[in-house]
Amino acid sequence: MDSATSDRAALQATADNGLKIVVVGGFGVGKTTMVRSVSEIRPLNTEETMTRAGEAVDRLDGVRSKNSTTVAFDFGRISLDERSVLYLFGAPGQERFWFLWDRLFSGTLGAVVLVDTRRLADSWYAIDRLEHHGTPFIVACNDFGGPLHTEQQIREALDISADVPLVECDARDRSSSKYVLITLVEHLHRLSAARTEDAPAPAGGAPALTPEPTP
Ligand SMILES: Nc1nc2c(ncn2[C@@H]2O[C@H](COP(=O)(O)OP(=O)(O)OP(=O)(O)O)[C@@H](O)[C@H]2O)c(=O)[nH]1
Ligand SMILES: [Mg+2]
């Protein structure tokens, strides 16, 4: 287990808008890879080697070459600007660890549902849980060079409406992953602005985002 952390990128003193974001999705879609590639601190990973003992319970369809899996969660951090800092939590993808998700979603402002378009059905549970919690999310299709689907086909397969942003990404690429997170934060700001449309704007720019109350 790699649990080392470092302060190689110290948090700016002006960072007063911390947002908890979860990266969720099916097994082996690249959640740990995304948190790793984008984090400005050495990420906390709870990767464990997958052994023969887990063969009976761990699903390996489509990800045969994978030999480690997240057993708790990943944690990383990225500053978007002087004030906004995202605290990233990567969820475990194996079904036997899904019981952790509901706790992980607590206090979460928004989520990235990472999708391998060759295994779209593996994303259904994540979307179901997010909708249950009322957690806003975007969908990011990670590039595994799989079969190409139109945006409409993906929306229909995942049963997501037109107002849920859908983007493509390569989780191994920092700027691509950062673009995904910026898309999510912009989505959250739009939702927040729509909620407070009639309220006067607070001094000092965009209103700070606050989590939805957990149902
Ligand atoms: N081709 C390709 N491979 C990727 C991409 N992102 C991640 N991978 C690879 O996919 C494998 C799975 O990545 P992980 O980041 O461990 O996936 P995960 O979703 O965290 O997996 P679990 O925590 O076990 O559910 C790794 O071997 C990555 O190197 C991508 O964008 N393209
Ligand atoms: Mg992982």
Image (cartoon, helix red, strand yellow):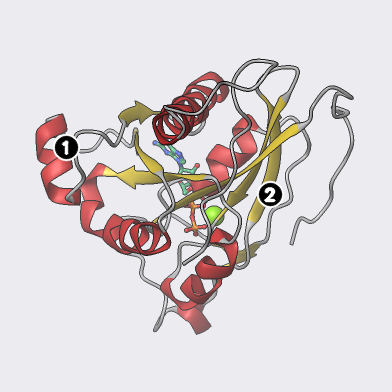
The structure residue drawn at horizontal position 62% and vertical position 30%, both measured from the top left corner, is: 38
Asked where in the image residue 174 lies, by quadrant, the reply is top right
Element type at mark 1: loop
User: Vertically, is 204 above or below 39?
Assistant: above
Q: Nearer the viewer, residue 63 or 212?
A: 212
Q: Residues within 10 Å of mark 2 (few under 14, many from 20)?
A: many
Q: Which mark is residue 215?
A: none
Q: Which mark is residue 75?
A: 2
> Which residue position is annotated with label 1?
147
Asked where in the image residue 88 lies, by quadrant, the reply is top right
Element type at mark 2: strand
The structure residue drawn at horizontal position 30% and vertical position 55%, both measured from the top left corner, is: 123
Relative horizontal placement of residue 211, taking residue 111 as reference (left or right): right
Distance, label 2 to label 1, CA atoms, is 31 Å
Q: Residues within 10 Å of mark 1 (few under 14, many from 20)?
A: few
Q: Nearer the viewer, residue 209 or 90?
A: 209
Residue 197, position in %: x, y? Answer: 42, 27
Q: Amino acid at mark 1?
A: Pro
Q: Nearer the viewer, mark 2 or mark 1?
A: 2
Residue 35, position in %: x, y? Answer: 60, 41
For marks 2 and 1, the one nearer the N-term is 2
The structure residue drawn at horizontal position 74% and vertical position 62%, both measured from the top left corner, is: 1
Residue 83, position in %: x, y? Answer: 74, 22
User: Vertically, is 213 above or below 75?
Assistant: below
